[in-house]
Image (cartoon, helix red, strand yellow):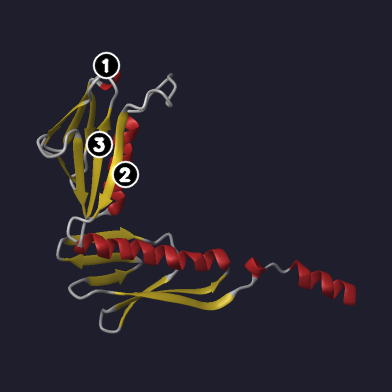
Amino acid sequence: FCTLLRTRTHSLSPSATMKIRATDNIEVPEGVKVAARNRVVTVTGPRGTLVKDLRHMMVDFRVEAKGTRFSVVRWFGKRLDIACIKTALSLVRNMITGVTKGYRFKLRFAYAHFPINVTVEGQDVEIRNFLGEKRVRVYSVPSEVKVYRTEQAKVKDELVLEGNDIEQVSCTAAQMHQLCLVKNKDIRMFLDGIYVQTKEHVQE
């Protein structure tokens, strides 16, 4: 019996233990309103409103202390379940930063011989002459993201993306980078492309 009890005790890993109630919270800054209904979080601030559907997370969202604190609660969760608390708080924290400061990504065009020509017409970005190709690459930027070229006199070969949603801005930058990937060549020698140079806030 003692051997069986010892075997069962050692078979319980730390990840298998269950916590009855796990919670964490973040402070909501002044001028920002956070609301949660049916696990759909809405954040409103000076720069606009962001809505994120978090119904795939099995947690409770609560706005406490007269709207100055946002809490996430997980009942009867194991280690991986409790880890979702920090993920949810990070998502809401990024939303708060977006509606107060905004996000700005600066992309630069790198080329050795063939200059990359980029034109912006509304929300459409056209990329020409990549590695001397005749193909015109066209990318439609989402309406939530502002895109424009920096003046050549100030900074040469720069494209700027601005928005409140960090997912929209970063995904747009990543997809524009993927448009100009070098194929069937040694990427250690052919470094042409569009790369993210700076990540900053619109309002400091």
Q: Nearer the viewer, mark 3 or mark 2?
A: 3
15 left or right of 165 in image: right
| Residue nearer the viewer, 83 or 148 | 148
**Which image quarter holds the N terminus?**
bottom right
The numbered disc on residue 132 is 1
Q: Is residue 63 left or right of residue 32?
A: right
Which mark lies nearer to you, 2 or 1? 1
Say which residue label 3 marks: 108
**Residue at screen point 20% across, 64% down:** 100
Question: Pointer 2: what residue?
Answer: 171
Residue at the location (38% across, 23% down)? Answer: 190
Q: SS for tag 1? A: helix
The residue positioned 32% from the left and 65% from the top of the image is: 93
- The x and y percentages for residue 73 are 44, 75
- Residue 62 position, x and y percent, is 35, 76
Pointer 1 local density, CA inside 10 Å: few below 14, some 14–19, many at least 20: few
Of pointers 3 and 1, the one earlier in the residue sequence: 3
